[in-house]
Image: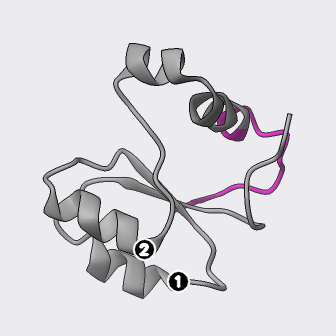
Amino acid sequence: MKQITSVQNPYIKALVQLQEKAKLRKQTSTFLIEGKREIELALKGGYKMETILFLSEIISEKELTTLIKSSNSEKIENFKRGLPKN
């Protein structure tokens, strides 16, 4: 499992762009979802997860693993709430 330690991380910056730009979401055929309930709904709907970022203060890695046991997504623990604003 990777851990993100800076909001200046290029991966986080790319996620912010994906969150803010509909054109980029269409081009990459990807989107962001937030929250345990939404992850559960997406998995039930047959969506494949590429990456899941989570806060260990909110959901443990064990809970997350149970939630996505059928998913082959990469798990990345985020170090603080929310994504940086541009």
Magenta region: which residues?
1-12
Q: Secondary structure at mark 1?
A: loop
Q: How many marks?
A: 2
Disc 2 or 1, which lies upstream in sequence?
Answer: 2
Above or below: residue 79 compared with residue 4: below
Task: Answer whether residue 6 is magenta in the image.
Answer: yes
Q: Are marks 2 and 1 in contact (CB under 8 Å)?
A: yes
Q: Quadrant of the C terminus?
A: top right
Q: Is the residue marked by circle 1 packed among few (<14), some (14-19), or many (20+) residues within 10 Å?
A: few
Q: Secondary structure at mark 2?
A: helix
Residue 76 at x, y percent in the picture: 55, 58
Residue 18 at x, y percent in the picture: 57, 30
Where residue 67 sits, quadrant-wise, is bottom left
- What residue is pinned by disc 1? 59
Q: Is residue 42 left or right of residue 14?
A: left
Q: Is residue 7 left or right of residue 12?
A: right
Mark 1: amino acid: Ile
Above or below: residue 71 compared with residue 22: below
Residue at horizontal 40 percent and vertical 77 percent from the top: 64
Q: Residue furthest front?
A: 22
